[in-house]
Image: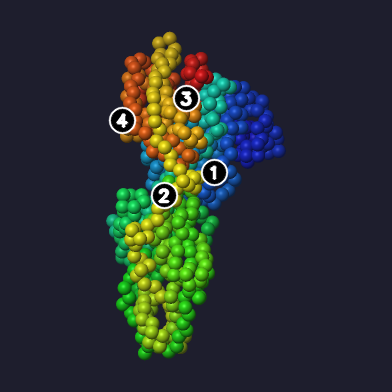
Amino acid sequence: MVDLMPMVIAPALVAAGVSGGIAIGGTIVSFASIAAYGVSLGATMGANLLLRSLEKRKATSNQQITVRQAITARVRGYGRAKMGGAMFYMGATRTLAQGFIFCEGPIDAYEEVWLADKKIIYTEGSNFCFAGWSWTNYVMVDLQIGAVGQSRNPAFDHIDHYWWDGTHQNQGLANAVMRCYLPNNAETNFTKTYQNGVPALRVVARLSLVYDPRSGATEWSDNPGLCIRDYLTSSRGFNIPASRINDASFMAFATMCDILVANTQETGGHEQRYRVWMTYTLDEQPSDVLRRLLASCDGEIYPLPDGTIGIRGGVWEDPTVTITDDMILGYEVQTGRDKLSAFNQLRIRYTAKNNDYQVQEGGAWNDTAAQTESGQIIPQDFDGTMCASYMQARRLAKIAMHKGNPQWLLTLTTSMAGLNALGERIIRCKLDDLGIDATFYVQKFEIAGDLKSCSMTLASLNSDAYEWTTSEEYWSPPPATDAEDGFTIPVPTGLALHIVQLQLGSNLIAFEIGASVTAPDDASFGALFQISLDGGVTWADMSPDGVWSANSGIIASETACQVQAAFKASASNIGTFCPPVSITTPGGSLGPVALALSEGANQDYGLASAAATISDDFGLASVASIASIDLGLAS
């Protein structure tokens, strides 16, 4: 195997900074010896450039981190997530190729592809994309959803992989392979193409498919009721036979989760009451994963009289059982605020979709009565990271505060008449001695061994916990964590466009669109330019060539374009775009080396001939054949 391995650069050694030679089985293999295996010196130098440019990854959410280790726990998830992956392959000959496993499949679809914190042009559901940006078409990504019968990732058909043959299929694993090619005149243009080194790959994906007993379909859903049912029955969860699940109970719960509730944050006024977006690793305790799933919807599972498993919670239920004095043999009473005075403020942590899916802290939920009574604020963290929105996390924090700070805590011993409370979630209790006539949440219920009495632990809870009005309880979601308070990002002015004609050869003419805006008063802002080739339906980021200017890359002749611009405080804190300005490139011809701004090989923006050239050979041979043509990159 040693004679094949020089083509594969060991990830751990690359991470350790080894660039001049590679240790394989105790033998040092130099780049010179790699050349002896048929790799040209120029390609070797290019591979070295690509390897040395592997960028340092910034700190981010755990599921977005790229992992380089031999064995890592598999990831599975529900709803939607932004993820990095575990590297399963890295090879460098004429091309640097990196393979990443994101999670167990099959997943429903990829929605977005990100490289180095830049969202690239990608058609949802596609299995291939070009990078665009400064990488133009020198970076390509092949995606697989993790179908059980999937074949080897098609990227390996276009790179020198040697030992990674057709038996390496990653069946049932959602994965991607990123290919990085050298630009023309690499010594001059490498740093312009790979401005921050080899980009980090992340994706936004819709995760597991789940069975919906209401329709009989198995499809993607972020409904917590359906996801909990899937986890209970999945071999990756509790592996409970489906016959033990009470589908009527889960159907009713799923329908409750789908009910629209007021939300002025994201969707123009309403959103589903409960959704779940979360990932987990297969080495986590199943009980911990189930706890997080249930916490996303205030749910609880419980046994039904027929021996099946049901689910309930999430909404207020008027009690049908009342415990009265004549049933009570004894009781203990505690004031809930004395018993659970450990917190009177919940600091909400949630996953911010508008901040790169990072975990951040939102506005706290306060129990003002408890704070007044104690004379101090006692905070506690509330984990809402599995919620799909900030407002959902606030609704659940309100319920948690009511449950965690009850007015009364009762421990009752009753006659067997108390059996009426068995299996109930909410009951009413009347205790005339203390003037208590209130509704309670049943925390615990037991039957004495002699079958003469029952005991139960109750915490007072009323319908206020589940009532929600945005006028009283809505809290504006916090901005991105790197945004500063007290400033407004201005709208750009003076957007100006110009066309540059490029002479690609004796008969080849193409064009490039340049854009600029007037510099803002606050020079700390950056500028973001976007171009649309389809009348403003989709937009692609342009490549910056100055602080307040950018260029499009090569555009076909007679192409109608629109350009818009916005200022930004950071990559995730972008202001309002100015009105777009239109421009059309003149007549002319576009040669086969115009590789920029293509959404994919099947997209025709006058680049069909270029796509065909690349599809013949995804290595550097085709690049070398046109290396003498000046793309204007040097300037």
Residue at which label 2 appears:
80
Which callout, 1 or 2, points at the residue further toward the start of the chain?
1
Q: Secondary structure at mark 4?
A: loop
Mark-to-mark CA distance, 1 and 3? 29 Å
Disc 4 to disc 1: CB gap under 8 Å: no
The span from disc 4 to disc 3 (Cα, nearest Å) is 33 Å
Q: Are marks 4 and 3 in contact (CB under 8 Å)?
A: no
**Mark 1 or mark 3: whose residue is earlier in sequence:** 1
Question: Label 1 vs label 2: CA separation?
Answer: 18 Å
Label 1 vs label 3, nearer the camera? 1
| Marks 2 and 3, how far apart at CA | 35 Å
Q: Nearer the viewer, residue 570 or 417?
A: 570
Query: Which mark is drawn over residue 535?
Result: 4
CB contact under 8 Å: marks 2 and 3: no
Q: Is residue 91 left or right of residue 358?
A: right
Determine whether the residue tagged by mark 1 lies in a helix, strand or loop: loop
